[in-house]
Image (tube, rainbow, N blue to C red):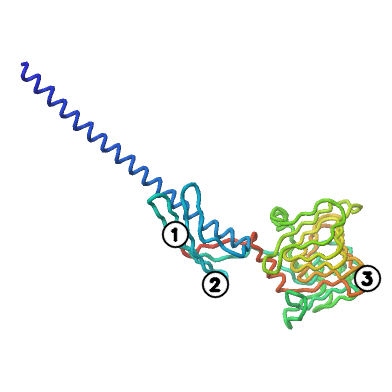
Amino acid sequence: MGRMSLFLVLGLSLAFGIIGFSMRGTTNYLVEAQTGYSKYIFARNLARTAIHTTLRAYDRSLPTIPTSGSFSGGSYVVQHSEIGDTLWITSTGMYADSTYTMKTKLLRTTKPFPQVSAAIGIRATPVKFSISGQAEVDGHNWDSTGTNLVGYGNVPGVATMKGSDSVTVTKAGGDIDGVPPVKVDTSTIDPLPFLDEYKLNADYVYNMSGVYNSASWGSSSNPAIVYCNAGDDTSFSIKFTGNVVGYGILVVKGNVQFNGNFSFYGLVVVDGFNTMVQFGAAGTPQVVGGVIVAGNAGASVMLKGTGSEAKIKYSSDALDKARRIGKLRYYSIIEWYE
């Protein structure tokens, strides 16, 4: 019995030793597998981060798109090219000894945009409209700089929702030109559904009454969003003087006056109850693109002009550039390989 007991103890010891060794091996394998999977996932996330970083750079119209970067001990490299609105992006994330590559083909798409069917499209009714001096509204299609006529794509000078409002505009007199100069057009899009996004994404915000001098808002290749909010009390106003140049989308609410050498290229939206936009008697204020007066009762447009005139010139090119603001674009996946 003593010898048998000894053999039994030795056998059990050997069995438990084998089992323990196997368990330790399994545990080590699981740790290695978990570590390897974590490195794989981190490299994959870095590759995805690289794509998002590249798209953000495109949205912001950066002069140089980054081709590499690092994050939390890992790194990534990016190759990108574009033809028109189509982007090809190849990104590789690297973490420890793991790498992960993504290849994508994307289409940059513009979000819905309130199309302008006249130099001034008026949704508000009844409308308050006045024009005096040498102020000019022109529905002929100009290039994006307002320098040369395109030769096609002409629109009315002013479009209203009702015949009675067209009569109001016509009786205001002044220099209104277009095809025809004044027209009833109920298809004019109300910009109100778009305004929240424009206001939330504004690059420049003026929300206190006062006089503002020289300013520069965006550029022809990198248009911006501007929000001038003087409120509904027209006894308070925002007034611009001096040299002001802007490109993109300008949202105006309240009593806002543009004087001096003011030039804006793109879409101007007049929003809000008691809103009054004045192109003053001084200087050479102009809008090249289009103006929409939102469908709020009480909105008014007052145009004055002396010297070289206050002008509103329709330009489909300037409007097209405005709708391509990076913040207002999204991406459709054509191909995505991992």
**Disc 2 and disc 1: Cα gap in Å?**
19 Å
Instruction: Specify whether residue 126 is in view.
Output: no
Indicate which disc residue 102 carries: 1
Write the residue at 84% across / 72% down: 311
N-term mark: 3 or 2:
2
Disc 3 from disc 1: Cα separation: 61 Å
Q: Which quadrant is home to the C terminus?
A: bottom left
Look at discs 3 and 2 and give the one toward the viewer: 2
Q: Which mark is residue 83?
A: 2
Residue drawn at (73%, 54%), measured in percent from left and top?
199
**Type of the residue with mark 2:** Ile
Q: Position of residue 174 (x, y in %)?
A: 91, 74
Q: Quadrant of the N terminus?
A: top left
Please name the residue that numbered disc 3 is placed on. 132
- Residue at x 12%, y 26% (from the top left corner): 11
Q: Mark 3 and mark 2: span between their CA atoms?
A: 47 Å
Pointer 3 or 1: first along the chain: 1
